[in-house]
Amino acid sequence: MSETDAIPEFKGRAGAGGDVGITNMSALTSGPGIKSVREVLAILLVAVIIIGGTELLLNIFQVPQYVLPKPSEIAVALVTEFPLIAPHLGHTLVELFAGFAIGATVGLILAGVITQFPFAEKIVTPYILLLVTTPMLALVPLLILRFGFGYEPRIIAVALAAGPMVMINAATGFRRVDAGKIALARSYGASTFQIFWKVRAPMALPMIFVGLMVGSIFGLLTAVGAEMVGGGFGLGNRLTSYSSMIQMPQFFAVVLILSILGILIYVTFFLLGKKFASWEA
Amino acid sequence: MTGENTDQPKLRVKNATKVYQTRSGDLLAIDRCSVDIRAGEIVSIVGPSGCGKTTLLWSMSGLHGLTAGEVLLGGKPVTGPNPEIGMVFQEANLLPWRNLDANINFPFEIKGTRPDRVWIDELLNRVGLEGFGGRFPRELSGGMQQRAALVRALSYKPSVLLMDEPFGALDAFTREEMNRLVEEIWLDTPTTIVLITHSIEEAIFLSDRIVVLSSRPGRVANIYDVNFPRPRSLEIMSTKEVFDLTNAIKREIVGKQQSRFAQPAAVQPAAE
């Protein structure tokens, strides 16, 4: 082993260990926290002004509904149409969860394995980057040709969109070698496996959460996009359907549901990250 | 000098040589270093920055192999991590996602053994960390973290404790307090300690012997005996003997650097 030993170095003495955390890792996860009732009130006030102002302006200028529906009409559509939209929301969630579960699992396993073999990692990384940057939506028509108009092409597209995102972030996490902590485990005689589970994995956790968050949001985009390409169900299908029928209030109601879904996903992972990986923040 | 005199040294470093392979070619870090460390002794290793002190210590611990030469613990070669050896690293090196109790349990989890709670509680008591088991490292001061690291290293009763610049990141007062603590625990337990330090004062306060390494490649330049009575007090540190010894060691370290950088003899730079 003597030939490949690294010079014992302790990087970043002052900062102590990493400086990467769930709250400072990327623009997605960082942001000023809301602290007081006043701030909450101010945020609500802005919403009231924007929504109320839009309502008012659309009324004043007599903007036709097919150009831009009034917020009140959207709210009404959301309530009255929801029973019809709900099953489609269910379909989208099934695609999202199934695809994300498959993609994230494969991505995590690949990241864990690949980072153990630096040479393999070097070879694979450009291809993963290719998967990350290629919009998986482009493959949907092809997938539909092969798998039909059911769940399968959408789930595959979601998995392909989310998996590489999860993998590339998790791999960054696993690669964060803290020589001191690994040496510590080794000084107790830890095996490679033990080092992975007891040092590398916990150290990678903040980055894994970032990957899961970004991956799930990419998954949502891809699911909706795939639904718009073909097949008779799903929120994306509702969007194309409502817009072709010029039912704008219903259309915007679906958009609203999608925004809420995205925010829920973001908040979920943010809270999970805070709970399980906040030790660095 | 404390320590039982047995014929065989506890830890014997024989012609330790280590070459690192780097992008810019081979790097000779330490060259034919030989030190015998007797059981129950405290030996410090001092030397200029980058002289291979840590490399030497890591070789003793079995974390690193040697390119040539060998390390013998109780007569048996050290080829890998050894349960008889405890390590204290630069900075406290606590795992930030574990609380204090879980950090101290870490060695036992890896080894698959049961921690001796009575002993650990006694150690925690001695270092003044009782009742802090649920705290996370970020909630502790630097001194507390380093004391926790000391407890972790002593928790499984190693016979040799290797300390890699353990108190370098602490302020002067905390550092003196830690030095007293180490001496106190050492006086009560049959532990052999090898300590790397940048502070000659710390080395003199704690050690029975001080090994001075030359700048890269690290070679054993000199070994000083430190024969002050124990337990040592801070008053000893202001005596003429300590002053002279400090200066002699400084000159030894600085002198090597001067020859390397060809500085004018009139300039007397302070040692690190």
Image: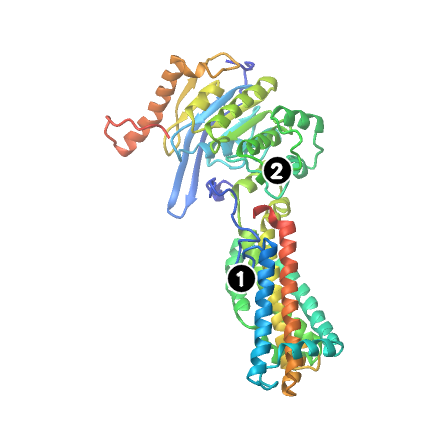
Compared across the picture, whether B229 is left or right of A259 comes to: left
Disc 1 element = helix
What residue appears at the point 58 percent right and 62 percent down from the top-left corner?
Answer: A43
Q: How is the image coloured?
A: rainbow
What residue appears at the point 54 percent right and 14 percent down from the top-left corner?
Answer: B5
Q: In the rendered structure, are the residues bearing label 1 and label 2 in contact, judged by CB atoms less than 8 Å apart?
A: no
Compared across the picture, whether B260 is left or right of B241 comes to: left
State the image quarter where residue B126 is shown: top right
Horizontal and vertical percent position of residue B232: 50, 15
Compared across the picture, whether B90 is left or right of A223 comes to: left
Q: Amino acid at mark 1?
A: Val
Q: State which chain disc 2 sits on.
A: A
**Disc 1/disc 2 C-alpha distance (Å):** 31 Å
Q: Is residue A193 above or below residue B94?
A: below
Characterize the local packing of mark 2: few (<14), some (14-19) or many (20 or more) Cα atoms within 10 angstroms: many
Q: Is residue B117 above or below residue A36?
A: above
Disc 2 element = loop
Mark 1 or mark 2, earlier in chain = 1
Horizontal and vertical percent position of residue A277: 61, 50
Badge 2 is on which residue?
A189
Using the image as rendered, state which of residue A172 and residue A266 is in the foreground. A266
Horizontal and vertical percent position of residue A142: 61, 80
Q: Is residue B141 above or below residue A262?
A: above
Q: How many marks?
A: 2
Badge 1 is on which residue?
A124
Q: Amino acid at mark 2?
A: Gly
Q: Is residue A237 visible?
A: no
Horizontal and vertical percent position of residue A276: 65, 50
